[in-house]
Amino acid sequence: MRRRWVLIVSLSLLLAVVICGVLAPYLAPHDPNIVDLTHKLEGPSLTYPLGTDQLGRCLFSRLLYGTRVSLSLALVIVVACLIVGIVIGCLSGYAGGWIDNLIMRANDAILAFPSLILAIALIAIWGAGWKQMAIALVIVQAAYYVRFVRGLVISLKQQSYITAARVSGTNAYRMMIRHIIPNMLPPLLVVVTLEIGWVIMDISALSFVGLGVQAPTAEWGAMINEGKSFIRSHPRLMIAPGILIFIMVALLNLISDAVTEKKGLGSPLRRKREAAE
Amino acid sequence: MSLLVADNISKTYGSAGWFRKSTSEGTGVRNLSFSLEEGTCLGILGESGAGKSTLGRIVLGLLPPDSGTITFEGIDLYRSDRKARKQWRRDIQVVFQDSYSAVNPRMRILDIIAEPLRNYERLTSLEERRKVAELLVLVGLTADDMHKRPGQMSGGQLQRVNIARAIALKPKLIVLDEPVSSLDMIIQKQILIHLRELKEKYGISYLFISHDIMAVHYLADRIAYIDQGSITDVRTTLELSNTASLKQP
Ligand SMILES: Nc1ncnc2c1ncn2[C@@H]1O[C@H](COP(=O)(O)OP(=O)(O)O)[C@@H](O)[C@H]1O
Ligand SMILES: [Mg+2]
């Protein structure tokens, strides 16, 4: 019963944050990028609910727009990982044999590195920027999805309805579309909710060190980075986006824990990740 | 010419297979030879673990034997070209023991039965529905059942759905792997009666795998006993009845 409440409350809070992000243009009192040096580093007031930053931009508006950037980037990355993971994982798990071996070896090679370090190395080659960051994160994250999906496919393959479908002439492609993917989505979606939290953290971390979303754009990690020179005089510039990151990751963790327990599903992706890092 | 001929087939589990990772080395079947005539039913009778399902999977073209050949209408199942394979794949169908796990739980009965039709024939959705309705009636269900999901049916009803799917393409051979073993006695009997009717009506041949001598006796024309992967005895059902009656006091 308590778990149910945890789920309901965290889902509503998450929904509230998402709505704030989506409606940022309507909710924000100011343009997040308008520089007004006459109002720089002001404390909270009626016009500026959370005060202004070193360039006189409205902190509250920047946080709202930052929510938008972080959430949409995280969503794009996770969906891309999901597609790559499903396509390659299905191929590997269903075909078996040397194809499976080849894919798994390549996958192991990616998984051998701590994922954030590998992402940084890739961005170092391609140059900083949010697109490069997104591609690098997809590459390092998708490896986990590939392995997870492959495991699901191999266990589904033993079901007799899959054998029955093979006997009735269903080819590999239709097998995936009709039988394997629909039956693998529930456990996969649980994993994905948790994964969004991780990705939000990765995006913020990379943007914080200047490799991801670049300076004028409002993004939580980039905002912390910009605010770090004022950590003593105006700590709220760092604390506010920091708190938001913390809340988002905590909410997503609570949700996926609650769902995992309710459905009796394990979350192998997460455990493997923890073991790897 | 016999419809299906198995010549000295052996299969030992050991290395990782296509469908399952094996845990231990074990003999599936050993030096099996038998033949199945068109329009007849060959019963495969044996204890659990005797290798019956292994044999079934070999006959279905799902598990290559280590040695020996299995020919269907004169074509070697495991050394056939694409075109021949397409034909026998269509002509050999299956019904498994557990009717629930043999259907995708997310699909409607309509989609389950129509699956083989969609794989081989181009039917309009109206034709398809008509065909599925026909098949449902043929196996003793009603046309309305096509809108149900597996969870809304009993094990016996679902087994009829499995049979409908197996006969949808008018196959020449159906492998029945313990098709009634997990059902109540009365339902077992009803389904066996239906299977016999279908066999007589359409001239379908059966490879009927079971550990239940009564069921085999009812449906099979000939019975092969299988023990630890080998066939120890083959008899016609008639011979069996005679010996049985002889032994009766
Ligand atoms: N995938 C497998 N890997 C290893 N051994 C198996 C596998 N499938 C079946 N066996 C073994 O082969 C023997 C025959 O099994 P099976 O054909 O399923 O028997 P039956 O259907 O007559 O009960 C058993 O000893 C079983 O343990
Ligand atoms: Mg069996």
Image (cartoon, coloured by chain):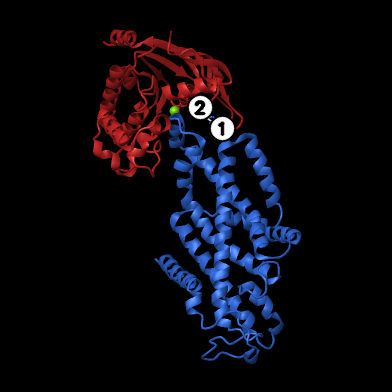
Residue lying at 48% horizontally and 45% vertically, measured from the top left = A181
Frontmost residue, B241 versus A91 = A91
Residue lying at 40% horizontally and 38% vertically, measured from the top left = B101
Residue lying at 58% horizontally and 84% vertically, measured from the top left = A58
Residue type at mark 1 is Trp
Frontmost residue, B161 versus B147 = B147
Find out whether the residues at labels 1 and 2 contact each other: C-beta distance under 8 Å. Answer: yes
Frontmost residue, A150 versus B41 = A150
Q: Which chain is represented by red in the image?
A: B
Q: Which residue is mark 1?
A: B18
Chain ID for label 1? Answer: B
Query: What shade has chain A been given?
Result: blue
Ligand 1 closer than 8 Å to label 2 CB: no
Question: Would you say B238 lies left or right of A142 here?
Answer: left
Same chain, marks 1 and 2?
Answer: yes
- Tag of residue A210: none
Where residue A15 appears, as percent x and y from the top left, is 45, 69
Q: Which residue is mark 2?
A: B62
Q: Is residue A249 above or below residue A231?
A: above
Residue type at mark 2 is Leu
Question: Would you say B110 lies left or right of A101 here?
Answer: left
Where residue A153 appears, as percent x and y from the top left, is 53, 42
Observer able to see residue B228: no
